[in-house]
Amino acid sequence: MEGRKSFGAKKTGRGATTQGKDGQRRPMFRRRKVCKFCSDKIDDINYKDTRLLLPFVPERAKILPRRISGTCALHQRKLRVALMRARQLALIPYTAE
Amino acid sequence: MTRKYELVYIVSPEATDEQVAEVHTQVDAVVQRLGGQLEKTENWGRRKLAYEIGRHKEGTYVLEVIQGTGELMKEIDRRLKVLDSVIRHLTVRVDETQAVIDRTKARRSATSQRRRVARGLPADRQPGEGQRNDADDDRDDRFDMGGM
């Protein structure tokens, strides 16, 4: 639709298009990432809720960066606190081999 | 100044049920003595630890919700550090975060009600109306955030 902000189709900004060798523009389609906590309206990011937190700790048990998970800044901060608390209580690991 | 705290402690897996109860009564005694209030106790039972603490691979988790002052929590913290059967504990203040959560919830529902009324709809969502489809989970091709 004309004049309407298009959501969902492409990720804007860096990496939206790639310049080929011959200078040809190739559009790179990437889904726009949305913050899980915003879209699901989860207000309480709790350290006790491992089911909620576990998708944000990949194999190496590092915290999944925002650029990959798409979490917004506010929720990433809250998530980080929750993850660090959960780590203290051995609910999620600090490291994994 | 009373505040609300959450205390989680992990009792060593070798401890008997009586020893777990003993830790709880000790915490309760301190709470009573320093004029606090024990709101809730939850025993999560024996769980596997994500990493070894000392030589332990699992532990019994107990959650206590306590109303009280900072001094009270300090005292409990000191006591739990001394106890050998408690291998790990964590105190978190929850009243402020809970207030923030309630505020955002209230604001969100107020906004949606205002918008619904502006669109000429009843303020509250009717049953079976415009529900989110759980099946569109599969649009998310990189991560399965919902599962696990």
Image (spheres, coloured by chain):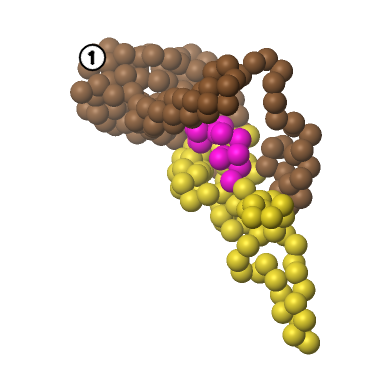
Left or right: residue B69 versus residue A68 is left
Left or right: residue A11 versus residue B85 is right
Q: Is residue B86 magenta?
A: no
Left or right: residue B81 versus residue A36 is left
Q: Which chain is assigned brown?
A: B
Residue at position x 69%, y 21% in the image: B129
Q: Main secondary structure of the magenta part?
A: loop
User: Of the residues shown, which amino acid type is indicated by label 1?
Assistant: Gly
Q: Is residue A45 magenta?
A: yes
Q: Which chain is assigned yellow?
A: A
- Chain under callout 1: B
Q: Is residue A90 above or below residue B63?
A: below
Q: Position of residue B99 (x, y in %)?
A: 37, 27
Q: Position of residue A50 (x, y in %)?
A: 59, 35
Residue at position x 56%, y 55% in the image: A66
Q: Which quarter of the rendering shows the C terminus of chain B? A: top right
Residue at position x 57%, y 56% in the image: A65
Residue nearer the viewer, B80 or A34: A34
Number of marks present in the image shown: 1
| Residue on which the image places disc 1 | B35
